[in-house]
Structures are given as structure tokens and as C-alpha cells.
Amino acid sequence: MPTFDLYTPLKVVGMRDGTFLADLEEKFREVQAALCRYVDRHGDKDSAGAKASLTVKITLAVEKTGTPSIKVGIITATPSEPMYVAGAMFGSDEHGPCLKVQKAGAYQGPPQQRRLCTEDGRRIDMDTGEVTDLPGDISPGPIADIPDGDQNDGHNPSIQPS
């Protein structure tokens, strides 16, 4: 009676039904492309510190049944879009206490660094001092909907509802 050898020694090339090396190469290209697109979109200066990674996770385990198993994963991480931050201060309007945002809108940076803007909300480029023709990136809602209301000095006053 013929015997069939249904098992072969474990090798990396045979993992994931023999597609592991091709899959790894494809994911590696995708991670590189994602990092390049990020730098293209945000520029060298704003991309400083951006990272992309590819991790291969191979887990050899013994299941509850006593059967050995091999789990193979290719995990990628690419830079996520920076969050937009709107500089705000405490204030109030006809409806009571509220946060007031800069008319120049939100930007991608630390909340402590406010955006320079003109009185009508046009942005001032912090590197060149040039005034842009259009209002800045708008946080939710158009800038025309931002009520003027009462102003305060931004030192976190106790605002009591009317």
C-alpha cells in the first residue's frame, strides 16, 4: 500500500498558502507609497517625525486540542492625517456661555500656537507674513455664522449661565 507524505517541514516560503513572500513585498511597497504620499501632501517640514512601519508577526502555538498551529500576519501602520486644531477662548453669545474660535479657522498644529489673522479672518502666513486672499480652514460651519458676542481675556473666567 502506498504511503502519502501529506506534511512538509515548515518554511517561510510556504506560509499563507505560498503567498507570504509576495504578500510581504506588496505590503512593503504599499507602506513606502503611503509615506511618500504623506510627505507630498504635507511637505518636508510638516512631515518631520512621520513614520510608516511593517511588522511581520508569526505565532507558533499549541491549541487546546494539543495541535500545533502557525499564525502569520503582516501588520502595517502608516501616518494618519494630523488633527485640525481650532484656537478657542471662553466667551458667550445670546444663548449663554460658549467657546469662541478664531475666524482664521482650524489648522494642523499645537493648540497653544494660534494662527495669525487679519480682523476679517484672512490668514497671515507665519513664515512669509503674506496675507492670504481666502479665509483659513473653517472649523464646523462657515465663519459668517460665528457670532461676535461678548469678548473676554481668555483666562478661563467662571462663566455662569444667565
Image (cartoon, rainbow, N blue to C red):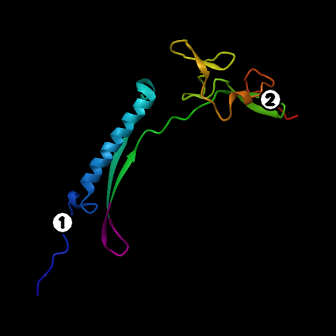
Residue 161: numbered disc: none
Instruction: State the extent of the magenta-drawn residues as a range.
Output: 61-71
Residue 72 sits above or below residue 30 on the image: below
100 left or right of 19 in image: right
Image side of residue 2 versus residue 65, left or right: left
Q: Is residue 55 visible?
A: yes
**Quadrant location of residue 85?**
top right
Q: Disc 2 vs disc 1: which is toward the camera? A: 2
Q: Please, what is the three-letter code of the amino acid marked with disc 1?
A: Pro
In the current view of this chain or complex, which residue is farthest to the front? 133
Residue holding disc 1? 9
Contact, CB < 8 Å: mark 2 with mark 1?
Answer: no
Residue 51 is situated, as x and y percent measured from the top left of the image, at 39, 36
- Residue at left offset 57%, top offset 33%: 84
Relative to the observer, which residue lies in front, 151 or 23?
Answer: 23
Of the numbered discs 2 and 1, the one sitting upstream in the chain is 1
The residue at the point 64 percent across, 32 percent down is: 139
Residue 8, x across and y down, in percent: 18, 68
Identify the residue at horizontal 65%, vertical 15% (top origin).
118
Quick one: SS at disc 1? loop
* Coordinates of residue 42 in the picture (x, y in percent): 45, 29
User: Observer-nearest residue: 7 or 33?
Assistant: 33
